[in-house]
Image: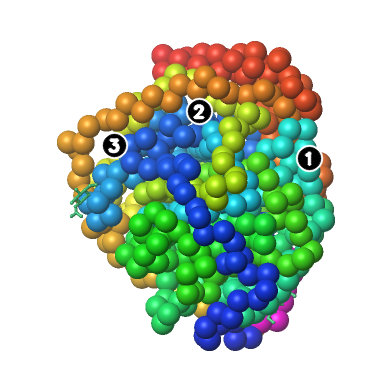
Amino acid sequence: MFALLSALAAGLFATTSFSAPTTSVSAAPSNYSLVADFSGNNFFSGFTAFTGADPTNGNVAYVGMDYAAERSYLGYIDNQVTNSTNAYIGVDYSNVTADRNSVRLSSKQTFSAGTIMTLDVVHAPVAYGTWPAVWMLGGLPGGTWPNTNGGEIDALEWVHETNYNSMTLHTGECTVDNSSSAFQGQLQNTNCNAGSGSTGCSIEALSQDNTNGATLATAGKAFNDQGGAVYAVVWTAQGVSVYIFPRDNQPSDLASGSPDPASWNTVPLAQFSGSGCDFTKALSDMTIVIDTTFCGDWAGKVWTSSGAAAATGVATCAAYVQNNPQAFKDAYFEIASIKMYSSSDTPPGTATTAKRDVSAPADFPTINIGDRHDSDNSTSGMNSTEHRHDHAHHANHHQHHHPNGTHGHTNTSAPCNSTNTATHSPSSTASLPSAADKDTTFGSGSSFGGGYGSGESSSSGGQADPYSNGIGTGTLSGGANTDFEASAWAVAALFALVVAAILW
Ligand SMILES: *[C@@H]1O[C@H](CO)[C@@H](O)[C@H](O)[C@H]1NC(C)=O
Ligand SMILES: *[C@@H]1O[C@H](CO)[C@@H](O)[C@H](O)[C@H]1NC(C)=O
Ligand SMILES: *[C@@H]1O[C@H](CO)[C@@H](O)[C@H](O)[C@H]1NC(C)=O
C-alpha cells in the first residue's frame, strides 16, 4: 500500500541505458515456459470468487461468480481492436447501496519465485471512491500476513483517479536497495515490513513510463485512453521487477510467449532487489488476486487529503460511493490475458487455502461497452464534475504524498474523449461462453493471514484472516480444518438462498 512518507525526488527518469547491478533480476533463468493462461472466454475458469468481508474495510460486498455473472459484473467483451475476447470485471453501477457489489477473484493455482506474470490490461477502474488492484497474495497454511503467509506483491494498484501505479511488496523482515538507475519509479521505503508490513515498500511509477523514447501512462485515465498496456512482473530469487510495454511493441520474446527478461533492454518501472531479502521465502505460494474495493483503509482514509472530497463535493467516501452508482459505470477491468510463465524448477501449485465461491457455474454475459456509453452520454466516466476538478485533485494528491513538492509526477490527465466507445465494438451477436467453473477442488481450509495491506490501517497485525471473517466462517484456525468445507458449503448455500430470495 502506499506509504505516507514524503521523499525528495529529482530527475527520476533514468534516461541512460540500464546498467545491470550484480543483483540484477535480469540475471534470472531465461527458460520460462507458459504454465497458466487466463485469457479468452475461459478466463474465469481459472479463478474463484472471495466472498468474505473486505479485509481492508471497504464499503464493498464481494459477491459470488454466478451472482456477478447474472448482474453483468463479470462477463466477456469481444474487442475488435485487440482482436480478442477479454474478461470484464466490473461493479454494481445501478444501485444506491452502502456496500457496493463488486468481485474479488483469486486464482486456483499458486506460484513461487521463478515466475513471470504478464498482465495485458485494456482498461482499469479509475473513479473517485475506488481502490482497484491486481496483485498476488501468499497462501502458506497457518501463516500470518504478511510475515509468514508468503507476503504480497502488488503489481497494479491505485485509488481514485491517481495517474500513476504504485507497486508494493508486503513482507516480514526484508529490505530492498534503492538504486535510481535500476528502475524508473520512486521507492518510498526500503523496509518491506514497514508499518508492521501494512505500509510495506512501495515504488511509485512516474505517471508515464519512459522507455526508449516512448512514453506510456501507467495508470489513470490516460492509461485507459491509450488502451492500457502489458505489464510484466518478473519474480526470481534475486527480486521482483515490474515492466510495462505497449501492447503492440513488446519485446519479441515476450510477444511470442518465450519471455527472456535478460533480453529486455529497458528499465523497469520498479525493481525490488538486494541482499536484505530472500525473495523465495519472504514471498511464496502466491495466488493472483483481482479486485475493486471502495473507500476502506486507503481510498477512504485519503478521501479528503487527496482532494477527492473537494472534487466530488461529497464529504465522505462512503457517502459518495453509496449515492452515486453511475460514477462506477467505468470502474471496470478489461483484461485481455494474464499469463504465467515459470522456470522449470518452479511449477505452479494448487491453491488449497483460499475460501472459494462454490456456487453453480456461471454463464457469463457478453458486455457491450459501446452500447452502454452510446445510450447515456453522461456515464462515460467523464462526467463534468470529475473533469472540472481533475487538476485540483491531482495537485492536492501529490501534495499529500509529497509535501516537499519535488516529486517527479506530472499531471497527465487526459481530456474527455470517446476512446472507450470507439474501441469497443458492438458484440450483441457473440455467443455466450458457458465457462463451466465448477470448483471441485477447494480448500483444505487452513487459515492464513492476510489481505492486502491494511495500508494506513491502525490495526496492522490485527488484520488477521480475511478468509475467516467473512460470512459465517469465523471459526477457522490454522491447520487442516475439515469443518471449513462444510461451513463454506453452508455459506454458499445460504448465499444461494439469499440470491434466490432476491431474485424471487
Ligand atoms: C531512493 O532514491 C531516490 C533518488 O535518489 C530518492 O528520491 C528516494 O527518496 C529514495 N528512497 C528511499 C526510500 O530512500
Ligand atoms: C484475429 O485473431 C484471429 C485468431 O485469434 C486471427 O485468425 C485473425 O487473423 C485476427 N485478425 C486480425 C485482424 O488480426
Ligand atoms: C440492484 O439491487 C437489486 C435489489 O437488491 C438487485 O435485485 C439488482 O440485481 C441490483 N442490480 C445490480 C445491477 O446490481
Q: Amino acid at mark 2?
A: Gly
Q: Amino acid at mark 3?
A: Thr
Position in image of residue 456 (x %, y %): 74, 55
Q: Does the segment drawn in magenta span residue 96?
A: no
Q: Amino acid at mark 1?
A: Thr
Figure quadrant of the N terminus: bottom right
Q: Is residue 48 left or right of residue 44?
A: right
Q: Which numbered circle lies on residue 144?
A: 1
Reading the image, the residue beneath label 3 is 366
The kind of secondary structure element at disc 3 is: loop
**Residue neighbourhood size for the residue with mark 2, other residues' Cα within 10 Å, grouped as few (<14), some (14–19), many (≥20):** many
Place residue 175 in its image quadrant. bottom right
The stretch in magenta equals 4-9
The kind of secondary structure element at disc 2 is: loop
Q: Which numbered circle lies on residue 64?
A: 2
Which tag, 2 or 3, sits closer to the chain's start? 2
Q: Are marks 1 and 3 in contact (CB under 8 Å)?
A: no
Residue found 40% across the figure and 48% down from its top: 337
- Of 466 and 211, the residue lying toward us: 211
